[in-house]
Amino acid sequence: MGTNHVKHFERMLLLAKHLDARGIHIRGHEYDPHFFGMWKVVAGSFEHRFQFLWDDRDQVLTISEGSFGKFGSQEGTWKEVREISIDARKGADPFKYVEDFFQTDPLPAFEPT
């Protein structure tokens, strides 16, 4: 594993610690270093989750909100809520945006369609 891969997982661990301190649980994580450094983090509760999809090539973080059944099944209803351009090549940290997103109290409410 190259240095960038190790940095990704170190940063992911730090994100998990920050979210855990706020009572936010990571429900899923994917990372593909061969596909432009794409990663995805799903965080939230059993019934209300947010998905953060980072496209390193286009430098865009896409945020989707999901509603899941009482038992938190993997099959939920996702709705894209926004895309944010983040210039990571100039030092901006997309993981920091994920941390900051969960700093709001209360969390953004899901409105089913």
Image (spheres, helix red, strand yellow):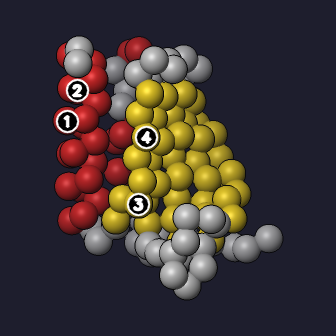
Q: Residue at x 51, y 81 (%)?
A: 71
Q: Secondary structure at mark 3?
A: strand
> Rounded to the nearest whole Å, what is the CA distance between mark 1 and mark 2?
5 Å
Q: Secondary structure at mark 1?
A: helix
In front: mark 1 or mark 4? 4
**Circle 3 is placed at which residue position?**
27
Circle 1/circle 2 CB separation < 8 Å: yes
**Circle 1 is placed at which residue position?**
10
Circle 4/circle 3 CB separation < 8 Å: no
Q: Secondary structure at mark 2?
A: helix
> Rounded to the nearest whole Å, what is the CA distance between mark 3 and mark 1?
18 Å
> Rounded to the nearest whole Å, what is the CA distance between mark 4 and mark 3?
11 Å
> Rounded to the nearest whole Å, what is the CA distance between mark 1 and mark 4?
14 Å
**Circle 2 is placed at which residue position?**
7
Asked if residue 38 is positioned above or below residue 67 in the image, the reply reads above
**Circle 4 is placed at which residue position?**
30
Q: Residue 8 occupies which quadrant of the picture? A: top left
Viewport quadrant of the N terminus: top left
Q: Amino acid at mark 3?
A: Arg
Q: Residue at x 58, y 48 (%)?
A: 63
Q: Give the class, few, some or many, for how many residues have Cα within 10 Å of label 4's Cα (few <14, many ≥20).
A: few
Q: Amino acid at mark 4?
A: Glu
